[in-house]
Amino acid sequence: MASQNIYSIGLHRFLSSMFTAALFISILSCSTRFHHKEPSMQDNRATLAASLRHAATISHRNPDSALIAYYGIVNRFDHKMDDSCRSIIADACLCASRILVRSHNYTEAMSLLTRGLSIYGSSKPSMLEVRMLNNIGNIHLLNQNYSMAEHIYSEAYDKIHGIGNDLARSQILCNQVVSNAYIGKAKKARHYLDIYKSLKLRTHNYTYNSKLMEGCVLRAEHKYTQSVEMLNKAMKYAADNDLPAEYKCDALKELSNTYKAAGMAHEYLDRLQQLYNLAKAEGVEDEQMFALRVLPEYYEKKGEKDKADALYAESERLSRKILNPTDYNRINSYYAINEHEKQLDEISLLRTEKLLEHERSRVARTIAGVAGISLVLAILAIIVIVKQKRRITQSYRDLYELNLSQDKAEKMQLSARISDEQTRVLSEKIRHVMDDTDELYDPDFSLARLAELTESNNWYVSKVINEVFGVNFRSLVNECRIKEARRRMADKAIYGQYTLQALAESVGFRSMSTFNAAFKKIVKMTPSAYMKETRRHNASDTDNL
């Protein structure tokens, strides 16, 4: 009997301790739930805003110093910063990119704009985000990636609704018209042009753009005579109103595009030569680059080798200065991956919030249950000793099952990641498409098409190419195409009558300038020089026979 009393008193004390601990845990949980806050960063905001104002005041008289100041602001970015600080840093990226664009350093400008979008990260549309998107679209348009430019302009146009800035809206609409006209969506281009004309702004820029875009839309509608007439009006308007040289260059460029679409080769090349001369005289290097994509090959075919070589050299110099293709592809891939990561972050955030809410509910239920059980057992301790032991045992079993379920969930999450075996299988499928099919010789061959052929998705295919092959998608395609071009140069029986341009097109290149740049980068000599050496080697082998 004495031993039973001692046991009962000990159990009573144990249960009372459990009850007290439960109450303490409940109070601590509520305090953590309702009173935890992230530290403020208002001091950082004031410092960053002052630095941004200083850089803006010196940007016109001393752009180099302003650029250094903007980079200093960007490099202070910390992932723990609040939205106001992120907005200031993104604004610094935009301002710095404008200075870089004025000096034709488009590669670095695009890198900054892409970083600015990543830093900004606000779900609420703003003019800052619209301007960054518009400038990224402009750089894609310069690099003749018209589909990507149109996609980004559409995103910017969707975000500008409700902001109420007609001037910014007119710029986006102008870009929408041109990009849709380039990719042949005449109906859509006409739709955006009608909206643009309804704004009725009273500026020289608005009047000029109305004529220029009308000419572009008419070309997309295959009305070439009307297109030429309207583009000549745009060029005359620019000359009569003493607009900057860029306006005349744009009109000449679109005129050359219209003559090319109409099949008028002489007029096309004549306008390209005019464009090159004007752009070179006025220092408009991006328009020089546009003309140099065609003119060197034209003079090479005419037999004017010295002039062709000089233009090739000028094209290579401007290509490195204005927009290096490798850097462009790297930044473009980064932009796509960044968009993908933003989507993944949003999904992860939603999952985390659900898990936290579930965990709070579970903890609250557990605490309430433990408190209730402890109170009941404290009152009935002596009567229900055996029953209480069973309850404790069952509680341990429940906790054990809960741990097992959590372990199972973690294993399922780990199994969702791409394994080494999946990487190996996917890399073999990629090699099969590149080595054993003619898919990559299609000019429209894309990462999405490769993902479709390998029964995967863009992100996994890009990741495996980077990890296994050590290059990006575009570099891998160019290497395979140049390898096949070299083989075809050596196959005189089938490809002996092919010109360099025909051979380049047969392996998927759209232009000779792109083919020349890729060939020289990989083989370390020009295609024409390589072909001469191949023919000399073949002739030597024939003589030996």
Image: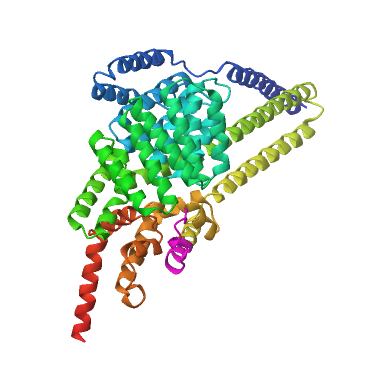
Q: Nearer the viewer, residue 60 or 416?
A: 60
Picture quarter containing residue 496?
Answer: bottom left
Residue situated in front as seen by the camera: 41 or 137: 137
The answer to whether 474 appears left or right of 151 in the picture is left
Residue at (45, 26) in percent of width and height: 206
- Residue 39 image point, x, y percent: 47, 17
Quadrant of the rendered structure where residue 509 is? bottom left
Total numbered circles:
0
Q: Quadrant of the C terminus?
A: bottom left
Residue 173 position, x and y percent, is 51, 31
Q: Residue at x 41, y 33 (%)?
A: 234
Query: Could you tell whether 431 is left or right of 304 in the image?
Result: right
The image's colouring method is: rainbow
Dominant secondary structure, magenta: helix
Taking 382 as reference, is 252 above or below it?
A: below
Q: Is residue 503 magenta?
A: no
In this view of the protein, can residue 67 be seen by the observer?
Answer: yes
Residue 163's image quarter?
top right
Instruction: Give the residue at the far right of this rendering.
Output: 383
Q: Quadrant of the N terminus?
A: top right
**Is residue 120 visible to us here?**
no
Residue 455 vs 158, above or below: the answer is below
Along the viewing direction, whichever of 63 and 475 lies nearer the viewer: 63
Give the residues in magenta. Answer: 428-446
Q: Nearer the viewer, residue 295 or 513?
A: 295
Q: Residue at x 21, y 75 (%)?
A: 537
Q: Is residue 34 depicted above or below 369 in this figure?
A: above
Image location (x, y in percent) of residue 122: 51, 26
Horizontal and vertical percent position of residue 379: 79, 21
